[in-house]
Image (spheres, rainbow, N blue to C red):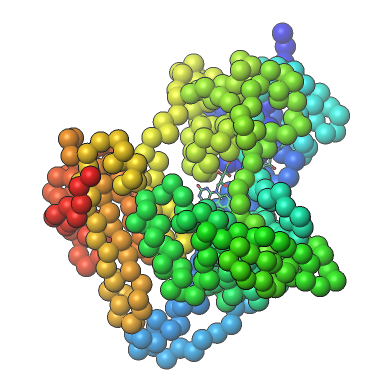
Amino acid sequence: MNFDYDLFVIGGGSGGVRAARVAASETGAKVGLAEDDRYGGTCVIRGCVPKKLMVFASEYGEMASEARSYGWDIGDGDFNWTTFRGKLNAELDRLEGVYRKLLANAGVTTYDARAIIKDAHTITLSSGEDITAKHILVATGGRPVRPERENADLGIVSDDIFHLDELPKSILIIGGGYIACEFACIMHGLGVEVTQYYRGAQVLRGFDEEGRGLVAESMRERGIDLHTGTDIIEMGPAGPGGKAGDPVRVKATNGSERVFDTVLFATGRAPNSDNMGLEEVGITLGRKGQIEVDEYSQTAVPSIYAIGDVTDRVNLTPVAIREGMAFVETVFRGNPTPVDHELIASAIFTQPEFGTVGLSEEAAAEQEPIEVYCTSFRPMQTAFADKPDRVMMKLVVSKASRRVLGCHIVAPNAGEMIQLAGIAVKMGATKEDFDRTVAVHPTMSEEIVTMKTPIRTA
Ligand code: FAD
């Protein structure tokens, strides 16, 4: 049978763009791609990139006071949201243009349309056009979800934060995951009064407990009013407004009742798999709506594959990209390549940052006997400026194999450090390999190779 395309990709985000581009430019496949919003997807338009630029913006606030401690004669200034947002939008426009160009240069035909699946080889676009393809790749990502409660539509979600007309004076952030904690630090750094409610006992569930504790402590020390074990009981409009982003009166389980200029729900994300005809053609969806795939990202329909957040495996940009590359290798180069989801380093861009690779102390202790090497101290740069900030370096080591099972760093620029530590851990480095490595002095990260005695065994 003759198809319009060898490959049709649904979704022009991190995974979809990479798979389309590589399949077209490196294997000569005829490729089409549909995107119903902006090219670049979550990461570029409403995730990693704008968030990191906001992290940078938020960090300048403290620099003036630190610089004064080092002898600089600098006054505090004000942050201008409108100026920043203008530059941010221009940068996102530029990046979207880059993504469009990458696809065009690779020879991918793009459709600015929503796509749904009609049958194992047919896609229907929102324009009404039907397109056939030998292979279909679903890379539709995910979206933020509001909790199901009365007046939840008064709150905003992470997508909205980049478009605020002005910065609120006060914000209530609901949630304890990495997105909630990152935005709490960002907003605080930009001068917003931040309150955060999380119903669990500690933020950043799933990460190393000592690291979570230090991040939470640092957030509180900086002035974020973080309440764990706390949730909303009731919320309603505080004035005549009544649309998302307007002031909200909130009653909480901790007994407080107050008005916040803005409420941000960072309470989870859902895969974009609704109303796409997926189950109708035989694709299996999981409990959260994620597309079920095998290790090669193949769905229950052999001609249809899925990658990235819509499969809800490890929801990170570099993972979506890896899955896209492995898909091309498997399907267009005849080299079946499963994606390795083990020992993925990642970072949470709180202040301080939290970089992590491998098992938390708690997960490792459940698996086998371990030794824990950990140090927490005030780093030279901020201690000199009389700041209370502490950092943490931690290695979780297998007693039997001596391999480093987990490395956890809470420190400024921990994201940069963990990328490099991740190579050693991925290579299977032992504690003794770390010990053999001569320290770089004076740095914070030298502690990672100079910890001599375990502080605990388990
Ligand atoms: P996406 O990038 O979401 O792309 C999917 C695309 O498909 C979208 O453009 C969407 O419009 C389009 N689409 C959906 N349905 C259809 C349809 N039916 N037809 C046509 N097009 C459709 N990851 C990190 O690694 N580091 C970070 O620091 C980080 N920070 C983040 C911060 C925030 C606030 C958020 C929300 C996410 C963050 N992530 C981060 C996660 C990262 O953005 C995602 O893991 C990544 O974008 C997933 O890529 P994807 O290709 O699966 O989907």
For this view, does 88 lie left or right of residue 128? left
Based on the displayed image, in which of its 4 quarters is residue 281 positioned? top right
Of 248 and 407, which appears nearest the observer?
A: 248
Q: Could you tell me residue 109's position as x and y percent?
A: 71, 32
Residue at x-position 63% and y-position 53%: 46
Q: Position of residue 449 (x, y in %)?
A: 19, 54
- The answer to which of 411 and 10 lies nearer the viewer is 411
Q: Which residue shows up at 73% across the image and 68% down it? A: 248
* Residue 274, placed above or below residue 456: above
Q: Is 332 positioned to the left or the right of 404 in the image?
A: right
Q: Name the quarter where the C terminus is drawn.
A: top left
Q: Going by the picture, which residue comes out furthest to the bottom? A: 73
Residue 279 rendering spot, x and y as whole percentages:
71, 23
> Residue visible at 36% across and 57% down?
211
Q: Quadrant of residue 428?
A: top left
Q: Quadrant of the N terminus?
A: top right
